Image (spheres, rainbow, N blue to C red):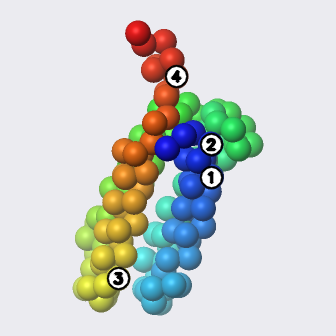
Amino acid sequence: MRLRTFNIIDYLASAVLIALPFLFGFSDIIVARNAFIFFGVVLFFNSLLTNYEYSFSKIIPVGFHMVINFALGVAIYFSPYFLAYRPALLPSQVLVHMAAGLFMIAMISFSRVKTEHDKYAM
């Protein structure tokens, strides 16, 4: 996936993360809802400040952006357990967490984005 595509998907993914609790019926679990809103906002600002085409300010290097996205993917995947709201979720809602977390990690894995370090490697 090219950097421009990755950039656009990041913004879309941030909106989807914020919407997931409402779309899959776990918005009444306050911790889960707030966690997904937090993850979506972090992803949005991470994208807004990353050094790529559709960003507001090019402060964050692309490589560090990928690290943040990976950490978000892991946090989303394990948030029902880390934040202790797993017993309140239906099995399908746990799968939503797993799918969203794996999507974040896969998005990094399938991107062919060159970081600043790669530009100088031979």
Find numbered disc 3 in the image and state the secondary structure of the residue it sits on: helix
In the foreground, 112 or 28: 112
Image depth: mark 3 or mark 2 in front: 2
The spot of residue 52 in percent (x, y) is 64, 36
Image depth: mark 4 or mark 1 in front: 1
Instruction: Characterize the local packing of mark 2: few (<14), some (14-19) or many (20 or more) Cα atoms within 10 angstroms.
Output: few
Image depth: mark 1 or mark 3 in front: 1
User: Reading the chain from its start, which is encountered first: label 2 or label 4?
Assistant: 2
User: Reading the chain from its start, which is encountered first: label 4 or label 3?
Assistant: 3
Inspect the image, locate mark 1, and give the three-letter code of the amino acid beneath it: Ile
User: Reading the chain from its start, which is encountered first: label 3 or label 2?
Assistant: 2
Q: Is residue 49 left or right of residue 98?
A: right
User: Reading the chain from its start, which is encountered first: label 4 or label 1?
Assistant: 1
The spot of residue 41 in percent (x, y) is 59, 60
- Tag on residue 8? 1
- Tag on residue 4? 2
Residue at (48% x, 80% y) in the render = 21
Q: From this view, report whether residue 20 is shown above or below residue 117.
A: below
The spot of residue 71 in percent (x, y) is 38, 49
Find numbered disc 4 in the image and state the secondary structure of the residue it sits on: helix
Quadrant of the frame with the C terminus: top left
Q: CA distance from mark 4 to mark 3?
A: 38 Å
The spot of residue 92 in percent (x, y) is 31, 85
Name the residue at the right extreme. Answer: 56
Q: Are marks 1 and 2 in contact (CB under 8 Å)?
A: yes
